[in-house]
Image: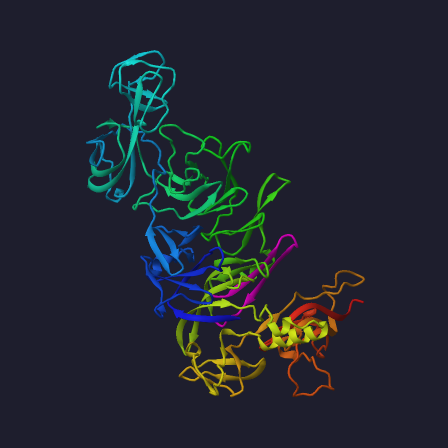
Amino acid sequence: MADAVKTSKRGFLKKFKISGNAGFIIEFGDKYIRLFVNHGQLLEESAAYELTSPYTLSDLWNEELECCNLQTVQNGDILYLFHPKYMKRLVRYANDNWALEDWELLNGPWNHVNTTETTITASGTTGTINLTASANLFAEDDVGRLIRLTLVNDDTTAWQTEKEVAQNAIWTSDGKYYQALNAGTTGNVKPVHTEGSKSDGAVTWKYLHAGYGTAKITEYVSQTGVKASVITELPKELVTSHFEFGMIYPGKNYPMSGTFYKNRFWILIDADDGLKACGSYSGDFNNFADQDFGEVTDECAVTVPVNSKEYNQGRWIAAADVLFVGTSSGEFYIDAVSNGSALAADNVAIRQISSIGSKPIEPVAIGGHVLFVDRFGTSIRDLVYSYDRDGYDPLDASILGRHLLVSGIVAWDWQDCPDKILWLAMADGRLVSFTFDAQQQVAALAWHDLSGAVESIAVIPSNDERRDDVWLAVKRTIGNVCKRYVEWIDSGTKEEYGADVESISDPDKREAAEIEFVRDNSFFVDSGLVYNRPTGDTATKLTGFEHLKGMEVAVSANGMERPHQIVADDGSITIKETDVRVVVGLPMKSVMVPQKIYLPTDSGYGLSAVQRIDHLTLMVYRSYGGKAGASYDKMQEILYRTSSELAGHDVELFTGNVVIPWPAGSSLVKNKGANIIIENESVYPMHILALVPSMASSGG
């Protein structure tokens, strides 16, 4: 059951959560970004609030891998966007003030140090300088790339105690360069400062630099020459073979995924020399400096190569109790070598978990489990720690429902409340739910027909913060025209009773009032809308259903089911003057088909015996409507009323056991196992608590 919000071109949904409120759904469309909040679209002067973006539909959709090309991670009011062509971030300055900004990393991450005989000559130390290489080195797409130049073969005197030093002499201390501001004999306080001037007890030393400087390439001149803007001052107009390029630049794929783990911002990059997982400077998420003024400290950035025997492309990176990495050829985890020390450049290791390979869909962390999509998109894998092998096993959590995943998963998101469900959008447009509760040993899949194709999914808390709302981008054919809608899945019944119900203290009267409230507020339609009649309005023509023009719709008024109608060309239907609350939407059919039932016999499990059902006892809770049978051509109505009740009496939702006589001839010799099919196409809920068949077997 889904409420329609608005039409759109194809949109890809991402979530944005904020404290003290439900959050936002962000729709990325063809060069636009729109937002939804509180079950409606964010507006600006009665028009859709919209941001211009560089992302085209072809940018957003990966045709080869059949999934969205955009991954995200949120940190406070910033949503970092990962895409092969762009480095952007979406920033919330206020609920009605958002900005799409460039995202640029500071000081790294860095590729390996040059190992050739090529040298670079810098024309200056600050400002705009020329960099000249001794051999062909630069390319046009190096513009925007960082470069770090370091002094080599330097014979500068190292600081020592009780040594004579001349004024203006330059010495080094722990790789940092200092200038003596006065002549004298050095003291016993070693210079370690990184700015200004300090005394060693006798000589005052001015900090100069750390033996290296960084710059950003701003203009391509030739294969041997570029212009650059200095970021941190170069030691001098140097000639050096010790240089490093930044991993990230427009000519190479930008980071494709990111996450936050152990106070670092981790990004996954297909670098020039292979796949890398890079962690930022501790606590400084935009800084990837792997040195701190020439020293490598525990806080410095960390780079971990992700190597495999097979061709290895990055797919995702996710944080749990360890840092997981998914690639095209396998899964890995990164953690500290020694748990007694901080994860740092000298205390980090990577281990391969499996060779399954992943699809570039962000994993879902659920307690101690991390679920990811295999590279074919046809199974859900559960990364869970195994004490037996002291490692992680990628268990196939969807093995019993693989027939529902054949077309391939294209998007998913996790709904924790009220039910623990992973919602999947499939390549063939189906919506599949995966109910997963490891503690209760539940892993079950089901297919949901929304009379349309689901293209994207995102989950945020509801605006009343009582449940998680599942939002969908749905493609439907309305009047032979392809249309798209942004919708959310409603619970079907209100979960907060009115004050008139809450005030009832008598348990029996309270139960009756709750049942009536649930019936009157049921919402079991697709792409539906709710109309509440204003006081004094007596209109019988109800408009606003242009999105369902020409379609047959189910109608519920004042809690009562009405005959289906065809929506007129002007988007209207007919209602009664007395109708106060009207629900209109596409009819939805719920079907439950358990596995075939085999009654064990004296000689075995009964697989070869004919199984017959005499009657079925159905235990339900606040339910009405529906049919049951052994096959779709032998279905019969489920009767909740007794013969003594009036046929025209108001519908009352039923709680208890319903006994259903089984149709004659529904058990055939060739079918062996007993079939049970239960379906409901009414506007009322059906909550099945138990199925109890009364059976006989030909095997005894």
Residue found at x 66% / y 55%? 440
Q: Which of these two is toward me, 576 or 509?
A: 509
Q: Which of these two is toward me, 655 or 112?
A: 655
Q: Quadrant of residue 497?
A: bottom right
Q: Is residue 339 magenta?
A: no
Residue 57 percent coordinates (x, y):
35, 61
Q: Is residue 430 magenta?
A: yes
228 with respect to 294 (left or right): left
Residue 400 percent coordinates (x, y):
61, 58
Residue found at x 58% / y 70%? 494
Residue 166 percent coordinates (x, y):
25, 14
Q: Which of these two is toward me, 353 or 691?
A: 691
Residue found at x 46% / y 71%? 4
Location of residue 675 with respect to 156 vertically, above or below: below
Residue 302 percent coordinates (x, y):
43, 36
Label count reads: 0
Q: Which of these two is toward me, 574 or 143?
A: 574
**Which of the image's four quarters has the C terminus?**
bottom right
Residue 85 in view in this figure? no
Visual colour scheme: rainbow
Residue found at x 41% / y 70%? 6
Residue 378 in view in this figure? yes
Q: Quadrant of residue 647?
A: bottom right
Location of residue 494 with respect to 536 vertically, above or below: above
- Residues in magenta? 428-451
Q: Quadrant of residue 484?
A: bottom left
